[in-house]
Amino acid sequence: MELIKEIEKEELFLLKRVKETLQLSKRKNTSVEVFIKKTIGISVNVRNSIIENVEFNSDGALFITVYNKFSKGSVSSKDFSINSIQKMLERAINISKYSSSDFFSGLPDIQSLCFHCMELDLFHPCEFNIKNAINLSILSEKAAFEFDKRIINSEGSFFNSHITMNIFGNSLGMLEKYKSTRYSTYNCMIAQDKNSMQRDFDYSISRKIDGLEKPEILGCNSAKRAISRLGSRKIHTMKSPVIFSSEISHIFFSHLINAISGDNVYQKSTFLINDLKMRIFPDWLNIEENPHLKQGLASKPFDNEGVITKSKYIIQNGILQTWLLNSYNARKLKLNSTGNCGGIYNWLVSNRNISFEELLKNMNQGILVTELMGQGVDIISGNYSRGAVGFWIEKGMISHPVNEITISGNLRNMWNNIVSISNDVDRRNNIQCGSVLLSEIQISGN
C-alpha cells in the first residue's frame, strides 16, 4: 500500500508539471506537445550465488516539442523544476525559429487523438524488496547446478522490477496518463563435456509478479538448453527446410516492421514499396495488431504523439493491409496516422493449430534454428543472411546440435515459403508467434 501511495503522489506531481508546461506555452502562442516518462525500479544481478550488482532506478525525462508554423523545435531534460521548464520552452521555440520549414510537420489531427484512456490492466505493483529479488536469482542458479553435473558455471542470474509512468498533453486539449509494471527474470548457464563448452539461457517476463516462471523451472530450463547444445557438429552447405523455433520466430517477423514503416515507405527505401494490398505471405496467414490486449507486454492506449491506438490487421489472408504510420509520414503519403508513432503493439500471428512435435514430423529432415546472430538483413532489397545455431532434424526427431552455419535468402521468398506455424506461441515478445516451418532455405556450412 505504501508503494502505491508513493506512485500516486509522484504521478500527480508529474501531471501537474505537464499542465503547467501547457499553460506556459499558451502565452507563447505556439503549438506544443509535452511528454513525461518516469521509470522506478530495482535490478539485481547474481552470479554463482554472489551478488554482482544491485541497482535502484529512478529515471525520468520531460520532452517538449514546439511547432512554430511549420518549423519544429524539440528539447528534453531531467530537471522538472518550473524554472527549467520555462528555459526549455524558450529553447524549443528558438530552435524552431532556426529550423527549416516543413509543410508536413505539426500536431496530429485532433480527431485522431486519445481523449479517454482505455484501462488495459497494465499496473500491478508489488512491495518487493532486494532480499526477495536476490533469493529468486539464487534459486534459479541453484536449480540449474543441481539439474546435471555437466552444468559447471553460470553467466549470471537477473531479476528486474520496474514501474513506468507516462503523462502526455498537447495544445489541442489532450491530457492523458497511464502507468505500467514490468517484471523479468533471466538465467544463463554453461555446460561442459569432454569435448566442448556451451551456454544457453531462459527468461520470463510479466506485468504481474506472480506471472513469472518459478525460479526452479527457469533454472532447469536454462540448464537443459545448455546441455542440449553439447556435441554440436558442423554440416555441409545445402538447401534444406528450416524451422525457426518459437523463441526466435518473432525476430523473423520483426523485419516486416522496418519494411512497412512510414519513413522507409515515403523515402522508397523498402523492397515492399509496391506491395500494399498485395499478397506477401501464404493466404492462410494473418497478423493482427492488438494494442488493447489486457496485461499485454506491448499494450498502449495511445502512441508517442497522443494518437489513439486501434486494433487492425497488418496481414489478412496473406495480404499486406497497411503501412505503419505516424502523423508526419502519413501526411507525406496523403494517408492517416495508424497510431504507430514509437513502434508496434501486440502482433498476434496466426498458426495452423498443430503441435511443435507435429511440425517436426511435417519437416521430416532439416534444421531447427534456436538462435540467430548478426544483423545481415537489407530492407531495401530484402536480402537476408544471418549466423545460426540449432539442431539437425532426422525423421521428424532431433538428431544432434549444429553450429557455425549461415542461413540466407530473400525475405519475399522466405515469407512465401512458410509451410506451417505450430501452436507453441511464445508470449514474451511484442510479436507473439509459434514455431515457423519454411519449405527451403540456403544453409552454408563446411
Image (cartoon, rainbow, N blue to C red):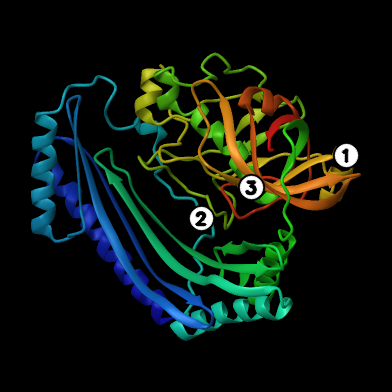
Q: Residues within 10 Å of mark 2 (few under 14, many from 20)?
A: few
The residue beneath circle 1 is 362
For marks 1 and 2, give the CA distance: 42 Å
| Secondary structure category for the residue under label 3 | helix
Of the residues under marks 3 and 2, which one precedes in the sequence? 2
For marks 1 and 3, give the CA distance: 20 Å
What residue appears at the point 43 percent right and 24 percent down from the top-left corner?
264
Query: Which of these two is toward me, 127 or 229?
Result: 229
What residue appears at the point 68 percent right and 45 percent down from the top-left corner?
433
| Secondary structure category for the residue under label 2 | loop
In the visual, does 12 lie left or right of 92? right
What residue appears at the point 57 percent right and 18 percent down from the top-left corner?
276
In the visual, does 217 lie left or right of 210? right
Q: Is residue 106 above or below residue 300?
A: above
Q: Which mark is residue 147?
A: none
What's under tag 1, amino acid-wise? Asn
Query: Which of these two is toward me, 12 or 355?
Result: 355
What's under tag 2, amino acid-wise? Glu
The residue beneath circle 3 is 248
**In the current view of this chain or complex, which residue is farthest to the right?**
395
The residue beneath circle 2 is 119
**In the current view of this chain or complex, which residue is farthest to the top?**
274
